[in-house]
Every structure is written in C-alpha cells, then in structure tokens.
Amino acid sequence: MYEDFYNLREEPFRLSPDSRLCYDHTSYKKAKAYMEYAMHRGEGFIMITGKPGTGKTTLINEITAQMLDSNVIVSTIECSQLKADDLLRSTVYRFGLAGETDHKSQLLNNLENYLIRLRREERRAVLIVDEAQALSKDAIEELRLLTNLQHANMPLLQIFLIGQEELLTLVHSPELRQLHQRIIATCSLDTLDEQQTEEYVKYRLDEVGWDGDPMLDPAIFPFIQRFSLGVPRWINLICSRLFLQGMIEEHHHIGLPEFTSVIKGLAKEQLLAPEIQNIKTALLKEIDDICYKKEKGNGKKKTILGEKLSQSKRQSLTNKRKRQEKVAKALFAQVEPRVSSGPEKLKLKELIKFLNKNGVGDCKLDLPEDLSKLGERGILAWIQYSQKEIPMETQDIISMLLNLLNKNTPQETRH
C-alpha cells in the first residue's frame, strides 16, 4: 500500500523473514561466518541462539540459499515438542527418504545408506534444527547419536542447532555433557543498538529505492530502538505502521509527533513487546518532554537571534530576500504560460521540466519528474533532504517559485 505512495519498489518492512533485505550487523555477520566455517569443517554441532525476531530464520534462509549450487545437501526441520522417535522420522523424511516402515533400526539404516552414498559422490549432508530449544533432552541426545554415523572415519552428518536463549541452558545440562563436547562453535544474534537501528531502517529503505520521501527526523531512531528493544521484527512492525499512517495522512515528514501517534495505536492494540507495554507511559512522556523543549528552545533561539542581529545584517538579509524574489518572479514569468491552466500536479510537472532545462542561476538541476506526485511540500522536503547538493539560496528561490505557482492555482484544481 504505502510503497506506491512513497514510490518504493516494494514494502521494506515485511514481518516475514526476507534475506534479500538482510542488514549485516555485527552479530549477524559473526553468526554467518561461524556457520560458513562449520560448513567448511563438515563435522560436529554449531549452535546459534537469539531472541525471537532477531534474524535466526533469515540467517537459515540465507545460508540455505548459498548452498543450492554446492555439494552440500541442506535439510531443515522445525521442532515443536518433537520426541526422539518423531525427530528421527522427521529427519529421514526431510532428506526425502520417506518409506513404509516406522521401525527405528530401519529408519537409521535408510539414513546411513543415503549419507554414505552422498559421501561417495563427494557430497555431504547438513541438518538444520530450528526452534531447537523446544526439543526434549531425549530428542537432543538422539541428534548426538546421528553424528556418530561415519564412513571411512569421516562424519556423515553435520547438525546446526538454532533456537532461543533457552537452548543454551538445555545444552549445558549435565545429561547432555557428551553433546556439549561436540559443539565446535556457538554464537548469539544480539539485538540492535541505536546506531544499528538507524542503519537497519535506512538500509532496508535504500534497498527498495527510497529517495528521502518521507523525510525521517533523526530524533525518532533512538525511540524506535527503545520501543522495539532493538529486535528487527519489532522494528519492522513500528516502521511499517509509521509509513502506513504517513500514507493515510499524506505526510512527507515523519517525526516524533507521528511516532507518538503510531506507538499509542500499537499500545492500544497490545501489539508492542510485552516488556514495553509496562513502561510505555514513561517513554511517551519522555518524547513529549523532548518535543516541548525543542519547541520552546526554537522559540528562544529565534528571540536571541533577533536581538543579536545588527541593523546592517538585517538589511543584508532583507536585500538578499529581495534579490531572491526578483529571480523567482523572473523565472515564473518564463514558466507561467506553461502552467496557466490544469491541475496542480500537471503544473508542478511542467515547473520541474522547466527547472531541469534552465536551472536556477548558475545551479544546474536534475529533479525527478515524478516529484510532482508529492505536491508542493513533498518537493521542498525532497530538495532539502535529498542526497543532491542544492545550495540553500537555490532552495529558497524554488520555494518562492512554488509559492507563486500556488497563488496562481485556483482552489478547485488543487489536491
């Protein structure tokens, strides 16, 4: 929905895992490196843990995709209170060995023969066990026994244990001491800090063609991190709502007021993280205080600035303003015949074409023609916050041009 309004190629903040939009933060890169290292070793267990929503499934999908054209056969099972015998059957089934028998010895024999055949073909197998914290100790021990399968003194099966933080406690229990000794590497997917949260959001936006619309107030990123606890899944939820509300209310700037409105809505629907539900009032008050101080401070700065400006400086600013107005009126006189009639968006499109062809003074412009869809405020926001370096004086003249165009646009043709 909102991706069309903001001219994005696709939705950047889906809740379902998407390795195409994966942001490689420090712990994610480390976990991926550990998995690749373990793939190279081809033996033992490797364990990756993390809170729900930190990217474990995304990591699995990315690694699995990398193995498609390799000599490694990867199978994934998701555990939901699987018992030992169920786990063995699921493993055999995932490797495409479903047969008529459910007898454990026959299942093991079928699996071993399959793994030996892979080894003779200079291929090997990897089993990824997702949500492994839900396994019973007997089931975990069954996995250890599977790693005993060997051919010519070479292990036939390597296992990755992926799960929430409870998996650490499970694996370190006394009954699983032998399994613990076979773990060759462990890594935890950490939550994102404030800087990583901002980088994560902007990375996903850049990947889908974001050109600065909507403009994002830097002040929102620390609070996105705090309300999401730095968990990518919660970050996606909050940002998705921010952009959806921005589309509904036709905002081309998202700041703390818009953020507060979205958070209150999510809190009312009880969609925030449980830990946040209990402290949301205090956090929202902190945002209100920042907004109040910012507004008050801006007013104070304007007063101090007015007092300190000398008469000569004021006159200089006045003269500069008059020069800019003169340039803007001269440019508008040239473009006015093209924009004398028609709807606002068409007039804006013609104005953009004119500016790209003629520039403003010595400043050459290359504005996207589809900026006309954003309206007057959207164009100004794009010019001010785009990656293109447009001088402030040129920005002021364009603002005056848009104001002149606005005055010459009948009310009934404006949207």
Image: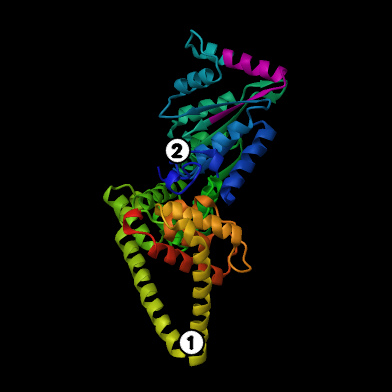
16 or 379, nearer to the observer: 379
**In terms of image quadrants, where is residue 13?**
top left
SS for callout 1? helix
Q: Is residue 381 left or right of residue 73?
A: left
Where residue 189 sits: x, y (%)? Answer: 53, 46
Q: In the image, what residue occupies the spot 43% across and 26% down?
A: 82
Label 2 sits on a secondary structure element that is loop
- Decide if residue 317 is in sight here: yes
**Residue 190 at least partly seen:** no
> Local crowd at mark 1 within 10 Å, few (<14), some, or many (≥20)?
few
Q: Residue 230: image x %, image y %?
A: 46, 53
Numbered mark located on residue 16 in the image: 2
Q: What is the C-alpha distance between the residues marked 2 and 1?
A: 56 Å
Asked whether disc 2 touches disc 1, contact meaning CB atoms under 8 Å apart, the reply is no
Tag in front: 2 or 1: 1
- Residue 278: which quarter of the image? bottom left
Can residue 387 be found in the magenta stretch? no
**Label 2 amino acid?**
Ser
Badge 1 amino acid: Arg
In-front residue for pair 25/308: 308
Outermost residue to the top = 100
* Earlier sequence position, callout 2 versus callout 1: 2
Name the spot of residue 264 as percent of width and height, x first: 30, 55
Q: How many marks?
A: 2
Above or below residue 143? Residue 220 is below
Numbered badge on residue 314: 1
Quadrant housing the N terminus? top left
**Residue 248 vs residue 216, the one in the foreground:** 248
Residue at left offset 44%, top offset 47%: 236
The answer to whether residue 189 is left or right of residue 66 is left
Query: Which residue is at 58% across, 57% downward?
Result: 356
> What range is drawn magenta here?
110-128
